[in-house]
Each structure stands twice: as structure tokens, then as C-alpha cells.
Amino acid sequence: ASSGGGKASSGGGKASSGGGKKDWPPALKSFVERCFEACRHDPGRKERVTNELKRIIERASAMNALWSNEPGVSDWDLMPVPGGSGPERVDSPGLSQNYRPYGGGYVGHRHAQGSAAPESPKDPSKKQSKKAQKAAAKAQKAAAKEAAANDKKRSHASVPLEEELDTDAERAKRARRMGRFGTGEAVGGGKKAAQLAAERHERLKSMKLVAAGVDNDEEKEEFWDSLTIRGTNTNLEKSYFRLTSAPDPATVRPQPILEKALRRLKTEAAGESYFYLQDQMKALRQDLTVQRIRNSFTAEVYEHHARVALANQDLGEFNQCQTVLKTLYGEGVSGQEVEFLAYRVLYSAITGVTGSNINTVLSTACAMRTEPAIAHALAVRSALQEDNAVEYFRLLGAAPSLGHSGTGDLMSQKNEQVRFRHVTVACKAFQPRVPVAHLARVLGFTTHRAYVPGDGERDPVVGPDGAPRVDPPWAQPGDVAECVNWLEAHGAVVKDDGGVPSVDCKESAPRLFVPEDKNAVAHGDQTLDIADFMASF
């Protein structure tokens, strides 16, 4: 990936070196701006509002609830302006004027605390029916239940945030949670988890979120930047641990160190197990996230992780990476956008996912089909839709000529299914027998041999659609033997036809089946074998 260009290059744009205000929830930004607006003409109140904002945001961050709209914690649209009471509280303009966020409902639901809503006046000339009496009793019971719930909410809301976060029970609970996770160090993490949690708590408690008297956009930007940490860790190797509290700068690596760590993973550690590479890449991504770094280097990290995931047939992790990359490219971050647009087309074809997002991807790809990689991906999609195994494996043979290893890795996910469908059709179409050597060539058992430039038989041929194709080479004895093993494992009957191994189509047709995957494991991750488990210590 290139190192510059776009809105997020190292020399321009707020998203280049650590993100901007957009990385915070929009509702939270509106709440903070509402708070500043409420105390614009009251300098004495600004300091109180600032301190309360600090505690509110720290509490929501510690509970991982900044984006979740938890009632009483991060329901930013309903949150009143802190540091005041009564008419000084300013609510969101879109809320009903009768709504009291901390009062437990709308004004008019009940007339007095602890009392039920009064009954409608009765007409003395008419006798109330039993049905009306039951409805009135039910309404009284519901009103009493609502009153009790609202009283309970008020009692909880009246507890100051600092007291709620500093109780012995809360500290003990936090210490137990932290004990389950390490500090982020590659070796020996977890021994000082409780101590580090206490140090982080004290540091956040004393951190100044914003100077008093914030009124303009520049000072508001400083408010958000004050919540972004800058790492000081210099270790190239670091394990991934899920955060349970605010990150500690001492365990987070800055971008220059992260760049060295990525180079190490691409060179020296490239031959390590996928379990190790995945652990290191996720730690890299986490350090970028907590520092709000969204630039071309961020794209390079996610692109490399996506390629590693494809090489190890981990479509789940690949999909996570390509989702983030789509957002980064949309923000103007420079990277290998053409390559990963082709991957998205292939991914949708292989997994069969549909929807408006895929339609948008396909529309974009069709507009860029002059790019060989994208034309190739669209041709693969068509071949899969038509169950055209011959065309599919011709396209697979041309994948190395694109220079993207991920293309062949993605297509290999579908090889088994394409082969089985073709054999099922072949056993009905060919009678009485079909040579195995022919099937070995058609089913891609010969495409493993490296393409050699200048080989006239296998030179890529660009079709009318702009996609390169390569005819598979003729089958060798080793290819035929591999194909025979595959056919017999799927129930086909292979016989010797005058010294030529052939499939008896009549006997094979009713016996074909898809065997159970011998490499599958219960948890779905083939990388977690004993060797990987021992290597993690």
C-alpha cells in the first residue's frame, strides 16, 4: 500500500494522524455541544459542567457503552446538562417538553408520587358495570407499579457518578474482570492487572477533558483530542488482549513502532503459524484504534491482515478487514482499492451473500471493469452462476498473472463445490465412461503447476470481457493419481479401460456424495492445534 495521498495522508486532513471528531458518537457530540451552549453566559458554571462531563464520559467509556445508548449511562439524547437543576437543565430540542429524563417518564402519567391516577367522574344515574370496575382496578394497579418504578429510578439517579464508580463493590468487580486479561505484553501479561487498573483510574480521574470557557470549534476539537491517548510502548511483539477499561499509554505502541512491527511480520515472522500472526495483527489493529489513527498506514495494516486471512482460508477475519477497508477508502484514505474491490466481488460470489450493499459493490465494479482484476472477478462470478467448471478453472489458472495472491486463495474456497457439481453432470452426460485424465484437466488438478512466462500453451488470453484466462496444462501421471483419489473419495467408480483409468458413469451416478471434512474441528478453527497451543506460552 502506498504511504500517502488522499484526505488521510500524513500531511493533510484531520483523519490523518489520529482521527477527528467523527470517531465519537454523534449523539455524544451533540450532548457536549448542548452542555457548552447551556453555560455560555455563566462562567462560574462552566467548570462544574466540565468536571461532570469528564466523569460521565469516563464512566461510559469504562463500561464500553459510548455507542450503546445505555439508559442512565450513555443515552446522550436524554441526558440532562450536568452542574445545574430545575429549569437550568437543557434537554435535546427534539424531545417532548413534557419528558423528564431523570424523573421517570412523561409529566401527566401520574398526579402525585405514590398515588394512582384519579378515576374519571362517575355518572350517579348509571350503575358501573363489572367490566368497567375491573378495568379501573387494573389501571390503578398499573399506575402504582409505575410510581414504584419511577421512585426506584430517581433513587438511582440521585447517586453521584463519582460515588457510584468508587464503591468497594465496583472496584472489586473491576479487579476481578481485569484479572482475566493481560496487560498487552507478549510475555508475562496479567500479573499486575489490578495495580495497572488502579493507576489508570487515578490518571483518568485527574485528566482534564477541556479548559474552562470552551466556546468555539477549535477548543471543542481540543476537547476530543484530550480523550485520545498517545502510546509510549516500544515493543515490536505484543499479544492481543480485549480491553476492559481505558487503555494505558505504557502498553500502546505509537505509529513509528507499529510500522516496524508490521515490517517484521511481513519479513522475519512471515513463516510463523497463523495463530501467532493473527494475534500480532489484532494487537496492531487495537493500538491503531485506541489512538484513533486512520491513515494510509492503517489501510496497509488491514490489507496485510486480510491477505494473511485469505491465505489461511479464514473468511470471517477477512470479512472484518474488508469492511473496515471499505470505510477507510470512503474517507479518502489511500490504499489498494482496486485489488480489494475485486476481492469483495469474489467474496460475494463465493459466499452467495446478497443485498443492497452487494448491489452497490457490483455497480462500482462494472464501472471499473477496465481493470483486469475487476474484470476477472466479474467473470468468476458469472462462471459460478452458470456452474461452468471449465471456465472457472481457466480463470483460476490466470489468477497468478494478476499479481494478487488473494484471488487464488479466495477462489480455492469454491474448488470442492465446483468439482463435485461438474462430476455429477458429467456422469449423466458421458456414457459409458470418461477418462480420468480429461477430468483431471477440466477440474483444475493441473493448475497447481506454476505458470512460466513464454509458455505458448499457457499464455493468458484476454477475452472480450477483459478478463485473462489460461487453459490448464495436460494432466501428468501425478495429476491423474490425485484426481483418482478425489473421485473415489466422492463415491465414483474408477475402472481400468485398456490401461487408461476411466470413470464408469452409469455405476457412479447414483453413488456420488460429498464426504465429511476430515480437517473440521468442533470450534471451527483448524489453527488451534496442540503445537499452536504450546507455542502461545
Image (cartoon, rainbow, N blue to C red):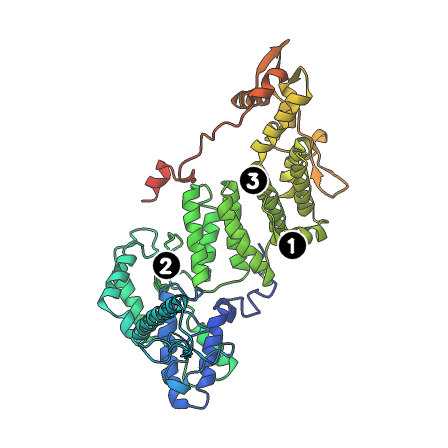
Query: Which mark sits nearer the N-terminus, 1 or 3?
Result: 1
Q: CA distance from mark 3 to mark 2?
A: 32 Å
| Nearest to N terminus: mark 1 or mark 2 | 2
Q: Nearer the viewer, mark 3 or mark 2?
A: 2
User: Which residue in the structure is indicated by mark 3?
Assistant: 409
Decide: is 230 above or below 222. Answer: above
Q: Secondary structure at mark 3?
A: helix
Q: Which is in the foreground here, disc 1 or disc 2?
A: 1
Label 1: few (<14), some or many (≥20) within 10 Å? few
How many angstroms separate mark 1 from mark 3 (CA)?
A: 24 Å
Label for residue 360?
Answer: 1
Q: Which amino acid lies under the numbered mark 1 shown in the image of this protein?
A: Thr
Image disc number at residue 478: none
Residue 400, located in which quarter of the rendered image? top right
Query: Could one spot residue 350 in this view of the protein?
Result: yes
The residue singled out by tag 2 in the image is 243
